[in-house]
Amino acid sequence: MSSEFNLNDFLMKAHKANASDLHFREGKAPALRIDGKIMRTAMPLLSEDDFENILFQIAKKDILEKIKVSNNIDFTYEIPNFSRYRVNYCKDLGLPKLTFRVIPYEIPTLENLNLPKYLSEFTKINNGIVLVTGPTGSGKSTTLASMVDLINKEQQKHIITIEDPVEFLYTDRKSLITQRGLGVDTETFESGIKYALRQDPDVILVGEIRDRETLEAAIEASETGHLVLSTMHTNSCVQTLNRILGLFEDSASKLLLQRVVNTLRAIISQKLLPKAQGGLAVAVEIMSATPAVSDYLLKNQFDDIYSLMQKSKSPSLATMNSSIYGLLRQGIITQDTALDYSDNKIEIEQMIRGIYHGAKNMMNGDLI
Protein backbone atom coordinates (compact mmCIF):
# COMPACT_ATOMS: atom_id res chain seq x y z
CA MET A 1 0.00 0.00 0.00
CA SER A 2 1.38 3.39 -0.92
CA SER A 3 2.05 6.17 1.56
CA GLU A 4 -0.75 8.11 -0.17
CA PHE A 5 -3.37 5.74 1.20
CA ASN A 6 -6.32 7.76 2.48
CA LEU A 7 -8.14 5.93 5.27
CA ASN A 8 -11.27 8.09 5.18
CA ASP A 9 -11.56 7.68 1.41
CA PHE A 10 -11.27 3.91 1.83
CA LEU A 11 -13.94 3.91 4.56
CA MET A 12 -16.30 5.94 2.38
CA LYS A 13 -15.86 3.53 -0.55
CA ALA A 14 -16.44 0.59 1.80
CA HIS A 15 -19.61 2.29 3.04
CA LYS A 16 -20.94 2.54 -0.52
CA ALA A 17 -20.26 -1.19 -0.89
CA ASN A 18 -22.42 -1.81 2.24
CA ALA A 19 -19.52 -3.22 4.23
CA SER A 20 -20.40 -3.89 7.87
CA ASP A 21 -16.83 -4.55 9.05
CA LEU A 22 -13.33 -3.68 7.86
CA HIS A 23 -10.05 -5.45 8.68
CA PHE A 24 -6.58 -3.90 8.62
CA ARG A 25 -3.54 -5.98 9.56
CA GLU A 26 0.12 -5.26 9.06
CA GLY A 27 1.45 -7.54 6.33
CA LYS A 28 -1.97 -8.16 4.75
CA ALA A 29 -4.26 -6.33 2.33
CA PRO A 30 -7.40 -4.71 3.82
CA ALA A 31 -10.49 -6.95 3.88
CA LEU A 32 -14.23 -6.21 4.15
CA ARG A 33 -17.31 -8.04 5.36
CA ILE A 34 -20.23 -7.60 2.97
CA ASP A 35 -23.55 -9.47 3.39
CA GLY A 36 -21.92 -11.61 6.06
CA LYS A 37 -19.00 -12.74 3.88
CA ILE A 38 -15.34 -11.71 4.09
CA MET A 39 -14.16 -10.08 0.86
CA ARG A 40 -10.43 -9.64 0.25
CA THR A 41 -9.30 -6.53 -1.59
CA ALA A 42 -6.66 -6.53 -4.33
CA MET A 43 -4.79 -3.70 -2.63
CA PRO A 44 -1.09 -3.91 -1.68
CA LEU A 45 -0.11 -5.33 1.70
CA LEU A 46 -0.06 -2.95 4.66
CA SER A 47 3.46 -2.05 5.71
CA GLU A 48 4.51 -1.14 9.25
CA ASP A 49 4.52 2.55 8.26
CA ASP A 50 1.08 2.23 6.67
CA PHE A 51 -0.33 0.75 9.87
CA GLU A 52 1.27 3.40 12.09
CA ASN A 53 -0.19 6.13 9.87
CA ILE A 54 -3.67 4.62 10.23
CA LEU A 55 -3.30 4.46 14.01
CA PHE A 56 -2.23 8.10 14.22
CA GLN A 57 -5.26 9.08 12.11
CA ILE A 58 -7.84 7.32 14.27
CA ALA A 59 -6.50 7.11 17.84
CA LYS A 60 -6.18 9.90 20.38
CA LYS A 61 -3.07 10.24 22.52
CA ASP A 62 -4.52 8.30 25.47
CA ILE A 63 -5.48 5.38 23.19
CA LEU A 64 -2.00 5.32 21.64
CA GLU A 65 -0.51 5.14 25.15
CA LYS A 66 -2.80 2.23 26.07
CA ILE A 67 -1.86 0.39 22.88
CA LYS A 68 1.79 0.42 23.98
CA VAL A 69 0.95 -1.69 27.05
CA SER A 70 -2.12 -3.67 25.94
CA ASN A 71 -2.82 -6.18 23.20
CA ASN A 72 -6.57 -5.52 23.11
CA ILE A 73 -8.24 -2.07 23.12
CA ASP A 74 -11.74 -0.92 22.08
CA PHE A 75 -12.44 2.66 21.04
CA THR A 76 -14.45 4.65 18.51
CA TYR A 77 -13.57 6.61 15.40
CA GLU A 78 -15.75 9.11 13.57
CA ILE A 79 -15.83 10.72 10.16
CA PRO A 80 -17.89 13.83 11.00
CA ASN A 81 -21.29 13.96 9.28
CA PHE A 82 -20.65 10.57 7.67
CA SER A 83 -20.29 7.59 10.02
CA ARG A 84 -18.99 6.27 13.32
CA TYR A 85 -16.97 3.11 13.87
CA ARG A 86 -16.31 0.83 16.81
CA VAL A 87 -12.65 -0.09 16.55
CA ASN A 88 -10.79 -3.00 18.12
CA TYR A 89 -6.99 -3.09 18.27
CA CYS A 90 -5.40 -6.49 18.82
CA LYS A 91 -2.37 -8.59 17.89
CA ASP A 92 -2.35 -11.32 15.24
CA LEU A 93 0.76 -13.52 15.45
CA GLY A 94 2.50 -10.60 17.13
CA LEU A 95 1.51 -8.11 14.42
CA PRO A 96 -1.02 -5.29 14.98
CA LYS A 97 -4.56 -5.55 13.62
CA LEU A 98 -7.56 -3.19 13.55
CA THR A 99 -11.17 -4.24 13.11
CA PHE A 100 -13.76 -1.56 12.31
CA ARG A 101 -17.51 -2.08 12.85
CA VAL A 102 -19.79 0.46 11.16
CA ILE A 103 -22.15 2.35 13.50
CA PRO A 104 -24.69 4.41 11.52
CA TYR A 105 -25.50 7.93 12.67
CA GLU A 106 -29.19 7.32 12.15
CA ILE A 107 -30.64 4.76 14.54
CA PRO A 108 -32.91 2.39 12.58
CA THR A 109 -36.40 1.64 13.83
CA LEU A 110 -37.65 -1.85 14.63
CA GLU A 111 -39.62 -1.64 11.37
CA ASN A 112 -36.52 -0.65 9.39
CA LEU A 113 -34.76 -3.72 10.77
CA ASN A 114 -37.72 -6.00 9.94
CA LEU A 115 -37.90 -7.06 13.57
CA PRO A 116 -41.14 -8.40 15.06
CA LYS A 117 -43.51 -5.60 16.07
CA TYR A 118 -43.97 -7.35 19.41
CA LEU A 119 -40.51 -6.20 20.53
CA SER A 120 -41.96 -2.73 21.10
CA GLU A 121 -43.92 -4.21 24.03
CA PHE A 122 -40.67 -4.69 25.93
CA THR A 123 -39.98 -0.94 25.78
CA LYS A 124 -43.14 -0.32 27.83
CA ILE A 125 -41.99 -2.38 30.83
CA ASN A 126 -41.18 -0.36 33.96
CA ASN A 127 -38.79 -2.82 35.64
CA GLY A 128 -36.98 -6.08 35.11
CA ILE A 129 -34.33 -7.40 32.71
CA VAL A 130 -34.65 -7.77 28.95
CA LEU A 131 -31.75 -9.55 27.21
CA VAL A 132 -30.89 -9.46 23.50
CA THR A 133 -28.62 -12.37 22.62
CA GLY A 134 -26.87 -13.82 19.61
CA PRO A 135 -23.45 -14.45 18.11
CA THR A 136 -20.98 -11.67 17.34
CA GLY A 137 -22.18 -9.54 14.44
CA SER A 138 -25.84 -10.56 14.75
CA GLY A 139 -27.09 -7.00 15.32
CA LYS A 140 -27.67 -7.12 19.09
CA SER A 141 -26.42 -3.57 19.70
CA THR A 142 -28.54 -2.23 16.85
CA THR A 143 -31.68 -3.91 18.19
CA LEU A 144 -31.06 -2.46 21.65
CA ALA A 145 -30.40 0.97 20.16
CA SER A 146 -33.73 0.79 18.30
CA MET A 147 -35.54 -0.11 21.53
CA VAL A 148 -33.83 2.70 23.46
CA ASP A 149 -34.64 5.22 20.74
CA LEU A 150 -38.29 4.11 20.77
CA ILE A 151 -38.44 4.82 24.51
CA ASN A 152 -36.71 8.14 23.81
CA LYS A 153 -39.37 9.09 21.26
CA GLU A 154 -42.42 8.01 23.24
CA GLN A 155 -41.70 8.26 27.00
CA GLN A 156 -40.44 10.82 29.50
CA LYS A 157 -37.65 8.78 31.05
CA HIS A 158 -34.02 9.12 32.13
CA ILE A 159 -32.03 6.53 30.17
CA ILE A 160 -28.44 5.74 31.18
CA THR A 161 -26.26 3.69 28.84
CA ILE A 162 -23.06 1.96 29.99
CA GLU A 163 -21.08 0.77 26.96
CA ASP A 164 -17.65 -0.51 25.92
CA PRO A 165 -17.20 1.70 23.95
CA VAL A 166 -20.13 4.09 23.39
CA GLU A 167 -21.57 3.17 20.00
CA PHE A 168 -24.82 4.79 18.83
CA LEU A 169 -25.25 8.46 19.76
CA TYR A 170 -28.72 9.53 20.89
CA THR A 171 -30.41 12.93 20.70
CA ASP A 172 -32.68 13.75 23.65
CA ARG A 173 -36.33 13.74 22.61
CA LYS A 174 -38.97 13.05 25.23
CA SER A 175 -36.33 11.33 27.34
CA LEU A 176 -33.07 12.50 28.88
CA ILE A 177 -30.17 10.25 27.86
CA THR A 178 -26.83 9.91 29.67
CA GLN A 179 -24.13 7.88 27.87
CA ARG A 180 -21.11 6.49 29.73
CA GLY A 181 -18.17 4.60 28.27
CA LEU A 182 -15.98 2.05 30.06
CA GLY A 183 -12.52 3.33 30.78
CA VAL A 184 -13.62 6.91 30.16
CA ASP A 185 -16.68 7.59 32.33
CA THR A 186 -16.77 4.48 34.51
CA GLU A 187 -14.42 1.60 35.27
CA THR A 188 -16.59 -1.51 34.86
CA PHE A 189 -20.14 -2.48 33.94
CA GLU A 190 -20.72 -3.46 37.57
CA SER A 191 -19.60 -0.10 38.99
CA GLY A 192 -21.42 1.70 36.17
CA ILE A 193 -24.70 0.09 37.21
CA LYS A 194 -24.01 0.74 40.90
CA TYR A 195 -23.46 4.46 40.40
CA ALA A 196 -26.24 4.73 37.82
CA LEU A 197 -28.68 3.93 40.62
CA ARG A 198 -27.64 7.23 42.26
CA GLN A 199 -28.29 9.19 39.06
CA ASP A 200 -32.11 9.00 38.99
CA PRO A 201 -32.48 6.47 36.14
CA ASP A 202 -35.59 4.83 34.75
CA VAL A 203 -33.86 2.69 32.13
CA ILE A 204 -30.28 1.36 32.23
CA LEU A 205 -28.68 -0.08 29.11
CA VAL A 206 -25.69 -2.31 29.91
CA GLY A 207 -23.57 -3.08 26.83
CA GLU A 208 -22.98 -6.70 27.80
CA ILE A 209 -23.40 -9.03 30.77
CA ARG A 210 -20.10 -10.91 30.88
CA ASP A 211 -19.84 -12.12 34.47
CA ARG A 212 -21.65 -12.83 37.70
CA GLU A 213 -20.88 -9.42 39.21
CA THR A 214 -22.50 -7.57 36.32
CA LEU A 215 -25.54 -9.86 36.37
CA GLU A 216 -26.00 -9.40 40.12
CA ALA A 217 -25.77 -5.62 39.68
CA ALA A 218 -28.36 -5.81 36.88
CA ILE A 219 -30.67 -7.91 39.07
CA GLU A 220 -30.34 -5.41 41.92
CA ALA A 221 -31.13 -2.51 39.59
CA SER A 222 -34.22 -4.25 38.25
CA GLU A 223 -35.34 -5.19 41.78
CA THR A 224 -35.28 -1.52 42.75
CA GLY A 225 -37.70 -0.55 40.00
CA HIS A 226 -35.59 -0.03 36.88
CA LEU A 227 -35.73 -1.51 33.40
CA VAL A 228 -32.36 -3.04 32.48
CA LEU A 229 -31.58 -3.78 28.83
CA SER A 230 -28.48 -5.79 27.97
CA THR A 231 -26.85 -8.39 25.71
CA MET A 232 -25.23 -11.80 26.10
CA HIS A 233 -23.19 -13.81 23.59
CA THR A 234 -25.43 -16.88 23.46
CA ASN A 235 -27.15 -18.52 20.50
CA SER A 236 -30.64 -19.22 21.84
CA CYS A 237 -33.00 -18.41 24.67
CA VAL A 238 -32.46 -21.78 26.37
CA GLN A 239 -28.68 -21.45 26.02
CA THR A 240 -28.97 -18.03 27.65
CA LEU A 241 -30.81 -19.54 30.62
CA ASN A 242 -28.06 -22.16 30.95
CA ARG A 243 -25.38 -19.44 30.85
CA ILE A 244 -27.18 -17.44 33.55
CA LEU A 245 -27.51 -20.47 35.82
CA GLY A 246 -23.87 -21.37 35.14
CA LEU A 247 -22.85 -18.08 36.75
CA PHE A 248 -24.52 -19.11 40.01
CA GLU A 249 -23.25 -22.61 40.77
CA ASP A 250 -22.78 -22.35 44.53
CA SER A 251 -24.71 -22.60 47.79
CA ALA A 252 -26.49 -19.33 47.09
CA SER A 253 -27.68 -20.43 43.64
CA LYS A 254 -31.24 -21.27 44.68
CA LEU A 255 -31.87 -17.80 46.10
CA LEU A 256 -30.21 -16.16 43.11
CA LEU A 257 -32.27 -18.30 40.72
CA GLN A 258 -35.41 -17.02 42.42
CA ARG A 259 -34.17 -13.46 41.93
CA VAL A 260 -33.51 -14.15 38.24
CA VAL A 261 -37.02 -15.57 37.83
CA ASN A 262 -38.52 -12.55 39.60
CA THR A 263 -36.68 -10.02 37.42
CA LEU A 264 -36.28 -11.62 33.98
CA ARG A 265 -38.88 -10.22 31.59
CA ALA A 266 -37.73 -11.55 28.22
CA ILE A 267 -34.91 -12.99 26.16
CA ILE A 268 -34.67 -12.07 22.49
CA SER A 269 -32.21 -14.18 20.47
CA GLN A 270 -31.35 -13.25 16.91
CA LYS A 271 -29.31 -14.31 13.90
CA LEU A 272 -28.51 -12.66 10.57
CA LEU A 273 -29.04 -14.93 7.56
CA PRO A 274 -27.97 -14.27 3.95
CA LYS A 275 -30.90 -13.43 1.70
CA ALA A 276 -31.43 -15.33 -1.54
CA GLN A 277 -31.07 -12.08 -3.53
CA GLY A 278 -28.25 -10.53 -1.49
CA GLY A 279 -28.21 -8.71 1.82
CA LEU A 280 -29.06 -10.05 5.26
CA ALA A 281 -32.33 -10.98 6.98
CA VAL A 282 -32.88 -11.23 10.71
CA ALA A 283 -34.40 -14.30 12.36
CA VAL A 284 -35.64 -13.84 15.92
CA GLU A 285 -36.49 -16.12 18.83
CA ILE A 286 -38.60 -14.64 21.64
CA MET A 287 -39.06 -15.99 25.14
CA SER A 288 -41.23 -13.82 27.36
CA ALA A 289 -41.22 -14.69 31.05
CA THR A 290 -44.81 -15.93 31.25
CA PRO A 291 -45.93 -17.65 34.48
CA ALA A 292 -45.45 -21.07 32.84
CA VAL A 293 -41.95 -20.18 31.62
CA SER A 294 -40.99 -18.90 35.08
CA ASP A 295 -42.28 -22.09 36.71
CA TYR A 296 -40.26 -24.29 34.33
CA LEU A 297 -37.21 -22.09 34.88
CA LEU A 298 -37.40 -22.58 38.65
CA LYS A 299 -37.53 -26.33 38.08
CA ASN A 300 -34.67 -26.31 35.52
CA GLN A 301 -37.06 -27.83 32.99
CA PHE A 302 -35.64 -26.10 29.92
CA ASP A 303 -36.91 -28.73 27.47
CA ASP A 304 -40.42 -27.91 28.64
CA ILE A 305 -39.78 -24.20 28.03
CA TYR A 306 -38.74 -24.93 24.44
CA SER A 307 -41.75 -27.21 23.96
CA LEU A 308 -43.98 -24.41 25.20
CA MET A 309 -42.40 -22.03 22.69
CA GLN A 310 -42.92 -24.57 19.89
CA LYS A 311 -46.61 -24.91 20.61
CA SER A 312 -47.33 -21.25 21.25
CA LYS A 313 -49.36 -19.20 18.77
CA SER A 314 -48.53 -15.98 20.64
CA PRO A 315 -45.85 -13.54 19.41
CA SER A 316 -44.55 -13.46 23.00
CA LEU A 317 -43.17 -17.01 22.59
CA ALA A 318 -41.58 -17.98 19.29
CA THR A 319 -38.77 -20.35 18.35
CA MET A 320 -35.85 -19.52 16.07
CA ASN A 321 -36.99 -22.24 13.68
CA SER A 322 -40.43 -20.67 13.34
CA SER A 323 -38.76 -17.40 12.34
CA ILE A 324 -36.37 -19.11 9.91
CA TYR A 325 -39.32 -21.04 8.46
CA GLY A 326 -41.19 -17.77 7.97
CA LEU A 327 -38.27 -16.29 6.01
CA LEU A 328 -38.10 -19.41 3.85
CA ARG A 329 -41.83 -19.48 3.17
CA GLN A 330 -41.68 -15.85 2.06
CA GLY A 331 -38.85 -16.65 -0.36
CA ILE A 332 -36.40 -14.37 1.48
CA ILE A 333 -33.87 -17.15 2.16
CA THR A 334 -33.09 -20.45 0.46
CA GLN A 335 -33.70 -23.93 1.81
CA ASP A 336 -29.96 -24.52 2.16
CA THR A 337 -29.65 -21.35 4.26
CA ALA A 338 -32.55 -22.43 6.48
CA LEU A 339 -30.82 -25.75 7.13
CA ASP A 340 -27.39 -24.22 7.64
CA TYR A 341 -28.55 -21.68 10.24
CA SER A 342 -30.95 -23.84 12.22
CA ASP A 343 -29.77 -25.28 15.54
CA ASN A 344 -32.56 -27.88 15.40
CA LYS A 345 -32.20 -29.34 11.92
CA ILE A 346 -34.62 -32.25 12.43
CA GLU A 347 -37.39 -29.82 13.31
CA ILE A 348 -36.68 -27.44 10.41
CA GLU A 349 -36.51 -30.41 7.99
CA GLN A 350 -39.97 -31.47 9.16
CA MET A 351 -41.26 -27.96 8.60
CA ILE A 352 -39.68 -27.79 5.14
CA ARG A 353 -41.27 -31.10 4.15
CA GLY A 354 -44.53 -29.56 5.23
CA ILE A 355 -43.96 -26.65 2.83
CA TYR A 356 -43.57 -28.91 -0.17
CA HIS A 357 -46.41 -31.21 0.78
CA GLY A 358 -48.97 -28.44 1.11
CA ALA A 359 -48.95 -28.14 4.88
CA LYS A 360 -50.72 -25.02 6.13
CA ASN A 361 -50.40 -22.81 9.18
CA MET A 362 -47.17 -24.44 10.37
CA MET A 363 -45.84 -22.95 13.58
CA ASN A 364 -45.41 -19.18 13.72
CA GLY A 365 -44.07 -18.52 10.23
CA ASP A 366 -45.56 -15.04 9.93
CA LEU A 367 -44.00 -13.53 13.02
CA ILE A 368 -41.63 -11.30 11.05
Image (cartoon, rainbow, N blue to C red):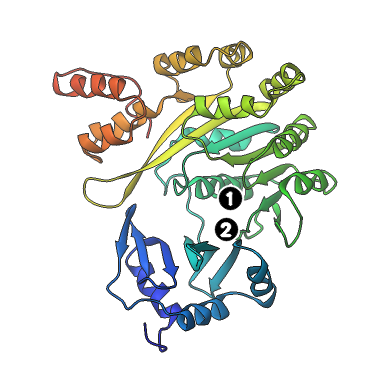
On screen, 83 above or below 297?
below
* Figure quadrant of the N terminus: bottom left
> How many discs appear?
2
Residue 131: name its quadrant. Answer: top right
Q: Residue at x 52, y 74 (%)?
A: 81
Q: Residue at x 67, y 67 (%)?
A: 69
At which x and y percent is residue 21? 42, 60
Residue farthest to the right, as pictured: 198
Q: Residue at x 62, y 41 (%)?
A: 230
Using the rendered image of the protein, determine whether residue 88 is visible from the camera's viewpoint. Answer: no
User: Nearest the camera: 77 or 56?
Assistant: 56
At which x and y percent is residue 67? 63, 69
At which x and y percent is residue 287? 51, 25
- Measured in 3D between alpha carbons, the distance from the residue under mark 2 to the one under mark 1, in whole angstroms, is 10 Å
Callout 1 amino acid: Asp
On screen, 301 above or below 151?
above
**Label 1 secondary element:** helix
Left or right for 320, reference 88: left
User: Is disc 2 surrounded by few (<14), some (14 to 19) or many (20+) residues within 10 Å?
Assistant: many
Using the rendered image of the protein, determine whether residue 179 is visible from the camera's viewpoint. Answer: yes
Q: Which residue is mark 1?
A: 149
Residue farthest to the bottom, as pictured: 4
